[in-house]
């Protein structure tokens, strides 16, 4: 979800709406309330902060808790749904949608608040628990916000330290982040710049958990009230008070509950309670996405799984009243969803890209494929399957009949959804004619060729929902890796291009000599930019790819990625390294100091070079004739690595 967009993306009117929202937030001091003089923190503010017993002060002020969750604006809460829909309520209750945002309790908190300390951007945070209350001791978040989001110079090293209650958690599937109340502005919740990783059960600094360029500090500070509330709660309302400039934030329910997808339920509940048992009303106001057409049902998902901002005339209305979209309505009535321009796009779409190329660069690959994960609606709506074939999110996904992990429908495994439309024999009974792979192999699974894992979020590669066809492009072009080489790890771009030409008549593209000779996966991992490296690192641990083109030759390549400049690349490479045969016991520390990481890489490379090879080496796999890694060539490719700054707004 991208409500906090860079200004100037679309028309000046659209930009003006978000300028006004920023100004409104500034009224409560979010961007300037702790400053004094010419961009300095005032001594009076600093001294006052040190003198106040903040937890006691917050409790007296009445905002040391998560936002108030109560029925409002027609919302009734999921407990009311359970009265009649027990099975549906049960399947939703087991989902990660429900646990997206929760109050801090022993049952909901994943992180260890046991005195653990985390260093984020040079500042120390100590995480503790006293009884049933969780605390963070660290620099004053209001003053951090003033310096970082106010676009000032770097915050001073001697910011006053404060002890604040941690009142709310976001996430439960892959990792969890936490929120503390502002010491000065009632109702405002600010993120702690620390993340607890569920997979490894450890704390890390927030900047290590996101793929972002060295100059990007936007992830360091975030306010829940205007940024995360829209998609991480149900019926969320920032509650901007136009008279006082304060925020009176409310939600109908924390997390993503029944009414996010079905609409506010008050009228439905009242109507049903008035009817005799078994009677059906002429018109039921509740919305069932499964009964909507492909466009409207997908827009229910797209209200969060898309790239958007509110239209000019609705920006401030959202700030005052909350989410304006209701399931079943036209999503773009109140919002603007930018699209990456493609041939034939309108001048307005091309103008968006010209006005703010960095915005698109942080969300799309250069060829228009979706890079940022969590934006599946934006990707799918540009596919022919949706535009012409009527495909919707519900063709593959279900809230109530699926595994919570990916929420893929249990009744449509593999390519089942694809062949609902593509019924010809070459896609069904004679599929090898089309795929040129064995019928039951991963190479004949439609998704692996047309929905490769080339989007990124949450420390993993995610399937691209644009439903594309495999195409070869030089690594230096900066585009997404192609599906063929993400499975055939040990083959070159030249090899893929030759087969695509032979099988499907694809015209060749110019390729440098390296790309015709060495493994494309190795080339992406060593010579690509950060996003290409991350996608390649993930696939080196993907089991179908390991079975197709894996082997011991991947170990030295992954060893180099342990020293990558980007934390997520290092994390994913470490996971893929442990997936290799005999490597399960390895545990490289992806947030260790650079010198430690480089020493770990050298140790692995030395061990692999000293190991007796069991097979003849292959040039494609960057091996010497005796099967040992060609370290000289590996290092030569690393020296030519694409060092462009890469940020992905997942």
Image (tube, rainbow, N blue to C red):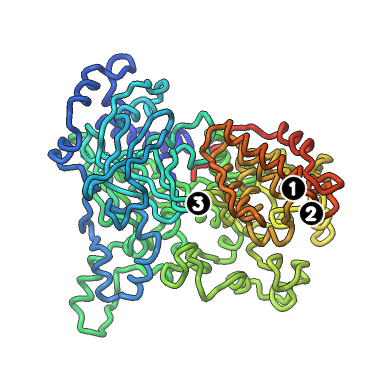
Q: CA distance from mark 1 to mark 2?
A: 9 Å
**Secondary element at image label 2:** helix
Residue hosting label 2: 496
Residue 543 as seen in the image, left or right of residue 648: right
Q: Position of residue 237 (x, y in %)?
A: 27, 48
Could you tell which of marks 1 and 3 lies nearer the N-terminus? 3
Residue 213 as seen in the image, left or right of residue 167: right
Q: Are marks 1 and 2 in contact (CB under 8 Å)?
A: yes
Q: Position of residue 486 (x, y in %)?
A: 69, 54
**Secondary element at image label 3:** loop
- Crowding around mark 2 (Cα neighbors within 10 Å: few <14, some 14 to 19, many 20+) is many
- Which residue: 45% across, 35% down? 6
Q: Position of residue 202 (x, y in %)?
A: 44, 46
Q: Is residue 242 visible?
A: no
Mark 3 or 2: in front is 2
Residue hosting label 1: 520
Residue 466 image-quadrant placement: bottom right
Residue 404 image-quadrant placement: bottom left
Residue 522 as seen in the image, left or right of residue 228: right
Residue hosting label 3: 375
Q: Are marks 1 and 3 in contact (CB under 8 Å)?
A: no
- Which residue: 48% across, 42% down? 209
Q: Position of residue 277 (x, y in %)?
A: 22, 84
């Amino acid at each position: 979800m991208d409500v906090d967009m860079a200004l100037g993306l679309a028309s000046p009117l659209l930009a003006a709406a978000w300028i006004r929202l920023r100004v409104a937030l500034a009224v409560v001091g979010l961007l300037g309330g702790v400053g004094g003089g010419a961009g300095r923190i005032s001594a009076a503010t600093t001294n006052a902060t040190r003198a106040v017993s903040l937890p006691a002060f917050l409790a007296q002020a009445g905002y040391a808790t998560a936002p108030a969750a109560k029925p409002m604006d027609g919302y009734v809460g999921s407990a009311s749904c359970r009265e009649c829909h027990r099975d549906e309520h049960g399947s939703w209750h087991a989902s990660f949608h429900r646990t997206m945002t929760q109050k801090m309790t022993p049952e909901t908190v994943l992180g260890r608040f046991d005195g653990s300390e985390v260093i984020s951007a040079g500042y120390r945070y100590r995480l503790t628990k006293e009884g049933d209350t969780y605390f963070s001791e660290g620099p004053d978040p209001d003053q951090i916000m003033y310096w970082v989001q106010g676009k000032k110079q770097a915050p001073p090293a001697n910011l006053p330290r404060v002890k604040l209650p941690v009142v709310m958690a976001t996430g439960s599937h892959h990792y969890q982040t936490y929120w503390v109340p502002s010491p000065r502005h009632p109702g405002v919740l600010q993120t702690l710049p620390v993340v607890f990783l569920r997979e490894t059960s450890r704390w890390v600094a927030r900047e290590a958990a996101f793929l972002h360029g060295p100059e990007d500090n936007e992830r360091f500070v975030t306010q829940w009230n205007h940024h995360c509330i829209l998609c991480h709660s149900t019926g969320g309302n920032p509650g901007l008070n136009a008279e006082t400039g304060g925020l009176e934030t409310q939600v109908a329910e924390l997390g993503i509950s029944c009414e996010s997808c079905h609409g506010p339920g008050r009228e439905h509940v009242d109507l049903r309670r008035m009817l005799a048992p078994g009677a059906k009303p002429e018109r039921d106001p509740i919305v069932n996405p499964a009964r909507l057409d492909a466009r409207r049902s997908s827009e229910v998902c797209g209200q969060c799984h898309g790239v958007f901002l509110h239209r000019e005339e609705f920006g401030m209305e959202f700030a005052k009243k909350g989410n304006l979209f209701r399931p079943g309505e036209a999503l773009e009535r109140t919002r603007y969803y930018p699209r990456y321009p493609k041939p034939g796009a309108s001048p307005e779409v091309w103008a968006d890209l010209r006005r703010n190329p960095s915005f698109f660069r942080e969300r799309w690959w250069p060829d228009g494929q979706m890079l940022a994960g969590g934006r599946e609606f934006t990707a799918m709506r540009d596919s022919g399957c949706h535009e012409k074939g009527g495909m919707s999110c519900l063709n593959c996904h279900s809230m109530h009949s699926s595994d919570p992990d990916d929420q893929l429908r249990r009744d449509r495994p593999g390519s089942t959804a694809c062949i609902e439309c593509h019924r010809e024999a070459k896609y069904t009974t004679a599929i090898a004619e089309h795929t040129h792979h064995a019928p039951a192999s991963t190479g004949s699974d439609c998704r692996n060729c047309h929905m490769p894992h080339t989007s990124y979020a949450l420390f993993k590669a995610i399937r691209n929902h644009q439903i594309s066809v495999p195409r070869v492009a030089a690594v230096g072009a900066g585009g997404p890796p192609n599906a063929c080489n993400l499975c055939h790890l040990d083959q070159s771009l030249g090899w893929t291009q030759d087969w695509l030409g032979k099988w499907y008549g694809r015209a060749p593209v110019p390729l440098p000599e390296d790309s015709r000779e060495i493994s494309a996966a190795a080339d992406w991992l060593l010579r690509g930019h950060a996003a290409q490296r991350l996608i390649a690192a993930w696939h080196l641990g993907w089991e179908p790819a390991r079975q197709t083109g894996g082997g011991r030759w991947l170990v030295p390549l992954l060893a180099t990625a342990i020293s990558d400049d980007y934390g997520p690349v290092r994390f994913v490479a470490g996971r893929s390294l442990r997936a290799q045969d005999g490597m399960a016991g390895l545990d490289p520390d992806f947030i260790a100091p650079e010198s430690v990481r480089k020493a770990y890489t050298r140790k692995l490379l030395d061990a692999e070079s000293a190991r007796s090879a069991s097979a003849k080496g292959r040039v494609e796999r960057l091996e010497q004739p005796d099967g040992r890694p060609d370290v000289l060539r590996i290092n030569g490719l690393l020296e030519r690595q694409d060092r462009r700054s890469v940020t992905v707004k997942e």
